[in-house]
Image: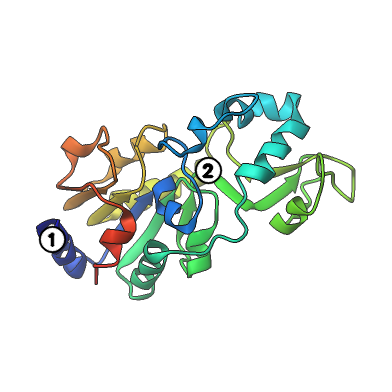
Amino acid sequence: MNELIEKLTKWVEKSSNIVFFGGAGVSTESGIPDFRSVDGLYHQKYSYPPETILSHTFFLQKTEEFFDFYRDKMIYPAASPNTTHEKLAEWEKAGKLSGIVTQNIDGLHQMAGSKKVFELHGSIHRNYCMKCRKFYSLEEIMNSTGIPLCKECGGIIKPDVVLYEEGLDSEVIDQSVRAISSADLMIVGGTSLSVYPAAGMLQYFQGEHLVLINKSPTPYDKNADLCIQAGLGEVFSRLP
């Protein structure tokens, strides 16, 4: 482990264009559970599987049940940035990191101070009326009951998160691809790389070193220049 972190440290020190690609494992140390680990959402018992509840069809057909699950299991207002979020924000401020591509919807990167964050799956902090597009904050969703309705037109307020069966935002994809394709060092952390099209973005990396940090193996390990099987906090707490 020491040798691996020493190698990564050298790469970070000489790099001037780092891109970080992260998944749920980035935020687990902030107390937000992931989906696929033993304690993740996919291993908990609900009336419907989480991937069903978090689908576009379920949202339209069983909207109140969707929001019951959403408020209970997708929103963690007490969560705060951890070591990884803070280190990435430091790198950006120092001019070493050019972007964060995240599959998370929690907004913790921005809370840590990062500015160049490309949210592939949206954010719980943005909510819009489906009729008139009036914006609503996370607090307004949390303080509502049942189906949140627009105060202006009575339309249903939908979180700006990408549900199953929905496509990713094309502009966010373009920004992410541009960042990845121009990076000299790409660090991928806290993701199983099993969710597409997000995972497929790694193919656009043309830089010098690809690093994968995850507690378990991923399908892309064989393509990496360095694999570290450990928690992100353990690794990032030792980086410059």
- Give residue 55's mark: none
Residue at 56%, 46% in the rendered image = 122
Question: Dot 1 corresponds to which residue?
Answer: 2
Q: Amino acid at mark 2?
A: His
Does residue 23 show up?
no
Q: Is residue 187 above or below residue 93?
A: above
Depth check, front residue: 45 or 8: 45
Total number of numbered discs in the rendering: 2
Residue at 16%, 53% in the rendered image = 208
Residue 76, image quadrant: bottom right
Q: Secondary structure at mark 1?
A: helix
Give how far across and how far down residue 178 sits, in percent.
37, 50
In which quadrant of the rendered image does the C terminus lie? bottom left
Q: CA distance from mark 1 to mark 2?
A: 34 Å
Give how far across and how far down residue 119 sits, in percent.
50, 50
Residue at 51%, 51% in the rendered image = 32
Q: Is residue 27 above or below residue 37?
A: below
Q: Residues within 10 Å of mark 1 (few under 14, many from 20)?
A: few
In which quadrant of the rendered image does the N terminus lie? bottom left
Q: Secondary structure at mark 2?
A: loop
Left or right: 14 as drawn, with respect to 107: left
State the scheme by which the image is colored. rainbow
